[in-house]
């Protein structure tokens, strides 16, 4: 197919206006630390304390990426980002990776030029209400005022849900989740809506958490995971296989406490994953013990889930869809071989 001079000019302009980056892993190595865009206000996923120490499920993922590169999970700096600012920070190169409870969608990947290497948490949107409201299901929210965060899939899903069910609602929109949950707590809205895991987390911030319930309906699919820029396959693969290594470790029974001993065993799957057999690190631009570094520094997927979101945390979230496929969930990783 022939291109017109005008179309070539347009393509050339688009190419020249796009940010140009060196290989991300080389930048990270040269700098000496990873820069991770994070949520600064979501207990369980991302939250700094008053001394600037960050914890959370998404935080540990960035630490795992740092561990693959440096064998030091602390060689990472976290940049607090709002939902509105997160994509601009990634596009501009301000951060190397976005790990901030971000939903994988077609427009974000195709139109905005991002890639989602893996789904680290399968979620879905829901609603929270006060018990005294007497509402037991989402369809009963007809005519309700609902607090929601601006510029998120949450806002779009909310509109879709009420349109599909031919019901009315009054959106009360805020720039940040913190503003939205505070407004709900003060009584400005009948309901607050966001991802189910975030509802559990945000409820901890309320003045009287036990006075509120999460309705049973899940109105959307929210596959959450780390996000990177398009155009750097090596970096995409490194981030993707960091997630897969953690899942494979859990399936194979490898933990931060037994990883060294497991590497000395005879199981070929375990030996390949931990670098005792084969040559799988060099493909990623890493050392042979790349996965062993992750597991010793951070742990398997199960360990990370438990301490941040599960029984070892304040949230006490059930694994649900995020259980391994061998245990009734849908978390599944390709093999290292």
Image (spheres, grey):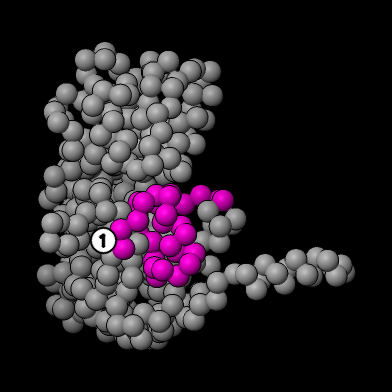
Quarter of the picture holding the C terminus: bottom left
25 over 87 or under it: above or below: below
181 over 4 or under it: above or below: above
- Is 98 inside the magenta-drawn segment? yes
Read off the magenta span.
79-107
Residue 73 visible? The answer is yes
300 over 337 or under it: above or below: above
Residue 114 position within the rendered picture, expressed as x and y whole percent measured from the top left: 51, 61
Front-lying residue, 141 or 311: 141
Front-lying residue, 282 or 10: 10
Residue 257 position within the rendered picture, expressed as x and y whole percent measured from the top left: 12, 70
- Residue 255, image quadrant: bottom left
Quarter of the picture holding the N terminus: bottom right
Q: What residue is drawn where x is 79% and y is 70%?
A: 8
Residue 126 visible? The answer is no
Front-lying residue, 309 or 208: 208
Crowd class of label 1 (few under 14; some 14 to 19; many from 20; radius 10 Å): many
Mark 1 element type: helix
Residue 176 position within the rendered picture, expressed as x and y whole percent measured from the top left: 35, 43
- Is 308 inside the magenta-drawn segment? no
Q: What residue is drawn where x is 16% and y is 69%?
A: 256
- Residue 129, image quadrant: top left
Apparent side of residue 12 relative to residue 263 in the rendered image (left or right)? right
Q: What residue is drawn where x is 46% and y is 43%?
A: 151
Q: How many circles with numbers are drawn on the protein?
A: 1
Apparent side of residue 170 relative to residue 42 in the rendered image (left or right)? right
Residue ID for mark 1: 59
Residue 311 position within the rendered picture, expressed as x and y whole percent measured from the top left: 14, 47
């Amino acid at each position: 197919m022939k291109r017109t001079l005008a179309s070539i000019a347009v393509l050339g302009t688009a190419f020249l206006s796009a940010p140009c980056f060196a290989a991300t892993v080389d930048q990270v190595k040269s700098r000496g630390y990873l820069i991770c865009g994070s949520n600064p206000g979501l207990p369980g996923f991302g939250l700094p304390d008053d001394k600037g120490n960050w914890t959370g499920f998404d935080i540990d993922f960035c630490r795992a990426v740092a561990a693959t590169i440096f064998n030091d999970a602390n060689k990472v700096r976290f940049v607090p980002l709002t939902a509105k600012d997160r994509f601009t920070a990634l596009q501009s190169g301000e951060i190397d990776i976005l790990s901030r409870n971000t939903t994988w969608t077609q427009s974000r990947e195709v139109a905005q030029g991002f890639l989602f290497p893996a789904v680290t948490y399968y979620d879905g949107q829901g609603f929270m209400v006060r018990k005294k409201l007497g509402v037991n299901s989402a369809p009963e929210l007809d005519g309700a005022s609902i607090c929601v965060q601006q510029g998120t899939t949450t806002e779009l899903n909310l509109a879709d849900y009420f349109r599909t069910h031919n019901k009315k609602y009054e959106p009360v929109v805020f720039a940040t989740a913190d503003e939205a949950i505070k407004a709900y707590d003060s009584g400005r809205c009948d309901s607050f809506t966001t991802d189910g895991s975030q509802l559990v987390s945000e409820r901890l911030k309320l003045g009287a958490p036990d006075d509120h319930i999460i309705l049973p309906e899940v109105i959307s699919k929210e596959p959450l995971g780390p996000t990177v820029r398009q155009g750097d396959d090596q970096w995409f693969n490194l981030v993707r296989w960091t997630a897969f290594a953690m899942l494979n470790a859990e399936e194979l029974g490898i933990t931060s406490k037994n990883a060294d001993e497991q590497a000395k065993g005879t199981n070929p799957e375990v030996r390949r994953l931990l670098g005792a057999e084969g040559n799988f690190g060099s493909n990623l631009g890493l050392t042979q013990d790349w996965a062993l570094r992750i597991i010793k520094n951070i742990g398997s997927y199960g360990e990370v889930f438990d301490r941040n979101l599960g029984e070892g945390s304040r949230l006490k979230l059930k694994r649900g869809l995020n259980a391994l496929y061998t245990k009734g969930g849908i978390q599944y990783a390709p093999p290292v071989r």
